[in-house]
C-alpha cells in the first residue's frame, strides 16, 4: 500500500553540510579539514570539490566503521589528529562532524579537549583544533560553510587593541571573486582580513612537486587579530546571529558589523563601495567609478536583448537573492527562485530585492530539481541561471543554462568565474546576453550573422 506521507528528494538542490565546512577550512593557511565519520564521506566530498576546482584536495577522516558506531569514535579521532599533525604539519585542523558521529552522540569538543590535555602532557605543541557540528541531515553545504567560519571566529579570534583593519566575510564565492575583493580593499588603501580565502589554496599555480598543504589562505595570526578590527563587512542577506560570524565579532569584541547582500549588480555593488568608503573615510577610487560607468553603458546596450525575458534562478540562497537583484535591474523577470536551503528568510529577501521592479516570483525553499521542474510548467522561461546540476532541466526545456555557483562539473573554469563588483557583473551580463543571442541564432532559419 502506498504511503501518502512519504516524500522523496529527487536530485537535491543542495549538497551536504560537512562539505561546505571542508571548503571553508581550506581557505585558512596551513589548515587541513578532518571529518569525524566514515571514510566514504571524505571520499565523496573530495570528488565533488576536485571536480569543481580542478585541484588536489586532501580531507582527513577518522575512518569509523561498524564497531565504532557501537563503542564510539573517540580513539579513532585522537589517532587521526595525531596522524594529521605528524604527516601534514597542519597549521590548523578543522574537525567537522558527520551524520554518523552526530547520531551515535560523540561529544567531539570533549574528545578534542581530552586530546589536547593528553598531548600537552607529553610536551607536544598543538595547532589550533577547531570543532564544528555539521550533520548533513540538519542543513545544506552553505550552512556547514557558515558554521565552520563562525566556529573559527569563536575558537581562534583574540581581543586586542583596536586597529584600522577591515574584516571581510565573503561567504562562498569563486576564487576570482576573492582575488577581486582583495584588490578592491587594497585600492582603498586599507588592510583587510578575508575569511576564508581559498583563492590560492583551491586555484594555485602548477608546481614541480606536490605540496601536501598548498600555499595561501588566511593566516591564523590574522584570524586572531580579527577581534581588534575596526569593522566587519559580511555578505549574506539571510544570515542571522545564529549563523553569522560577523554578529559573533560584534557581540564578543565590539567590531562594528555591516551586513550586505552579495555585490552582484549595480545596487548591491554600490552598497558595498559606499560601505567601504564610509569605513575608510575615502572616496571610491576612479578606476572603479569608470568600471561602473562602463557597466551602466552595457546595461543600456543589452536592454533590447534582455527586456521582458523570463528566468529561473536556483542555488544557494544568498547567491540566488543577489542574482535576482541583478536580473531585475537589467529587465529580466525572475519567474522562479529556488533553493535547497530552509533559512525561512529566503522569500522575504527575494521580495525585498525585486520590489518595485516586478511581481514577486514563485519562491521555493527546500527545493529539489523534480519540484523545480514541476514549477516550471507554464512559466515559459527563456533562461536558467544556476550551477551544473540543472543541466538536465535545461536540456529538457530546451533553454540556455548560464552556469553560476557551485558545483560546476560540466564546464571548464567555473571555479574562477568572476561575478562580483562592477567588473564581475559586467562579465555575468555578457554571458547572459550571449546565451540568449546564441539560442536565437541557432533557432533562426537563416542563422543571422549580425544580431
Image (cartoon, grey):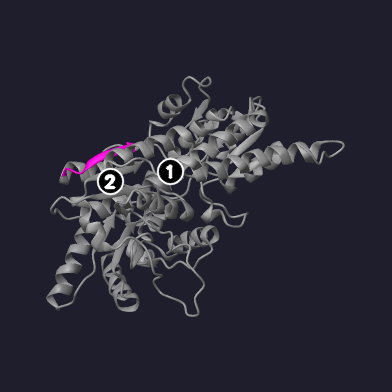
Q: Magenta segment: does it hold 159?
A: no
Pair 2/1: label in front: 1
For the question of whether residue 262 can be seen, the reply is: yes
In percent of the image, x 51 and y 58: which residue is there?
48
Q: Quadrant of the C terminus?
A: top right
Magenta residues span: 254-259
Question: How many numbered callouts?
Answer: 2
**Nearest to N terminus: mark 2 or mark 1:** 2
For the question of whether residue 133 can be seen, the reply is: no
Quadrant assignment, res 225: bottom left
Q: Which mark is residue 286?
A: 1
Q: Which mark is residue 245?
A: 2
In percent of the image, x 18 and y 51: which residue is there?
163
Neighbor class of circle 2 (other Cα within 10 Å; few <14, some 14-19, many 20+) is: many
Relative to 248, does residue 413 appear above or below in the rendering? below
In percent of the image, x 53 and y 21: which residue is there?
358
Image coordinates of residue 298 in percent, x first then y, are 59, 36
Relative to 288, does residue 196 appear above or below in the rendering? below
Residue at the right extreme, as displayed: 446
Q: Nearer the viewer, residue 386 or 115?
A: 386
Q: Nearer the viewer, residue 49 or 260?
A: 260
Image coordinates of residue 424 in percent, x first then y, are 51, 45
Amino acid at each position: 500500500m502506498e504511503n501518502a506521507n512519504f516524500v522523496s528528494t529527487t536530485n537535491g538542490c543542495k549538497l551536504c553540510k560537512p562539505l561546505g565546512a571542508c571548503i571553508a577550512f581550506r581557505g585558512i593557511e596551513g589548515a587541513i579539514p578532518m571529518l569525524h565519520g566514515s571514510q566514504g564521506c571524505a571520499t565523496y566530498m573530495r570528488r565533488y570539490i576536485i571536480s569543481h576546482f580542478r585541484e588536489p584536495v586532501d580531507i582527513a577522516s577518522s575512518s569509523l566503521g561498524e564497531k565504532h558506531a557501537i563503542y564510539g569514535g573517540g580513539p579513532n579521532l585522537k589517532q587521526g589528529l595525531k596522524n594529521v599533525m605528524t604527516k601534514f604539519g597542519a597549521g590548523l585542523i578543522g574537525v567537522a562532524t558527520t551524520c554518523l558521529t552526530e547520531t551515535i552522540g560523540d561529544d567531539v569538543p570533549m574528545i578534542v579537549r581530552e586530546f589536547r590535555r593528553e598531548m600537552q602532557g607529553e610536551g607536544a605543541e598543538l595547532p589550533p583544533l577547531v570543532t564544528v557540528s555539521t550533520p548533513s541531515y540538519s542543513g545544506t553545504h552553505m550552512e556547514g560553510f557558515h558554521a565552520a567560519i563562525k566556529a573559527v571566529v569563536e575558537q581562534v579570534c583574540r581581543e586586542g587593541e583596536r586597529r584600522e583593519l577591515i574584516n571581510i566575510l565573503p561567504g562562498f564565492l569563486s576564487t576570482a571573486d576573492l582575488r577581486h575583493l582583495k584588490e578592491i580593499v587594497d585600492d582603498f588603501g586599507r588592510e583587510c582580513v578575508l575569511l576564508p580565502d581559498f583563492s590560492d589554496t583551491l586555484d594555485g599555480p602548477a608546481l614541480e612537486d606536490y605540496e601536501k598543504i598548498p600555499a595561501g589562505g588566511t593566516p591564523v595570526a590574522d584570524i586572531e587579530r580579527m577581534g581588534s578590527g575596526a569593522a566587519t563587512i559580511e555578505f549574506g542577506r539571510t544570515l542571522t546571529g545564529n549563523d553569522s560570524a560577523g554578529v559573533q565579532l560584534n557581540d564578543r569584541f565590539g567590531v562594528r558589523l555591516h551586513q550586505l547582500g552579495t555585490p552582484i549588480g549595480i545596487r548591491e555593488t554600490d552598497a558595498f563601495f559606499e560601505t567601504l568608503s564610509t569605513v575608510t573615510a575615502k572616496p571610491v577610487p576612479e578606476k572603479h567609478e569608470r568600471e561602473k560607468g562602463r557597466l551602466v553603458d552595457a546595461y543600456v546596450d543589452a536592454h533590447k536583448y534582455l527586456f521582458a525575458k523570463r528566468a529561473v534562478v536556483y542555488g544557494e540562497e544568498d547567491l540566488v537573492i543577489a542574482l535576482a537583484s541583478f536580473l531585475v535591474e537589467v529587465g529580466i523577470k525572475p519567474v522562479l527562485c529556488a533553493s535547497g536551503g530552509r533559512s525561512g528568510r529566503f522569500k522575504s529577501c527575494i521580495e525585498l530585492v525585486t520590489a518595485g521592479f516586478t511581481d514577486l516570483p514563485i519562491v521555493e525553499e527546500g527545493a529539489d530539481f523534480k519540484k523545480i521542474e514541476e514549477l516550471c510548467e507554464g512559466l515559459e522561461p527563456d533562461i536558467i541561471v544556476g550551477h551544473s546540476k540543472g543541466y538536465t532541466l535545461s536540456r529538457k526545456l530546451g533553454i540556455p543554462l548560464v552556469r553560476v555557483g557551485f558545483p560546476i562539473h560540466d564546464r571548464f573554469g567555473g571555479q574562477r568565474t568572476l561575478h562580483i563588483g562592477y567588473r564581475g557583473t559586467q562579465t555575468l551580463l555578457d554571458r547572459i546576453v550571449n546565451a540568449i543571442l546564441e539560442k536565437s541564432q541557432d533557432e533562426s532559419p537563416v542563422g543571422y550573422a549580425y544580431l
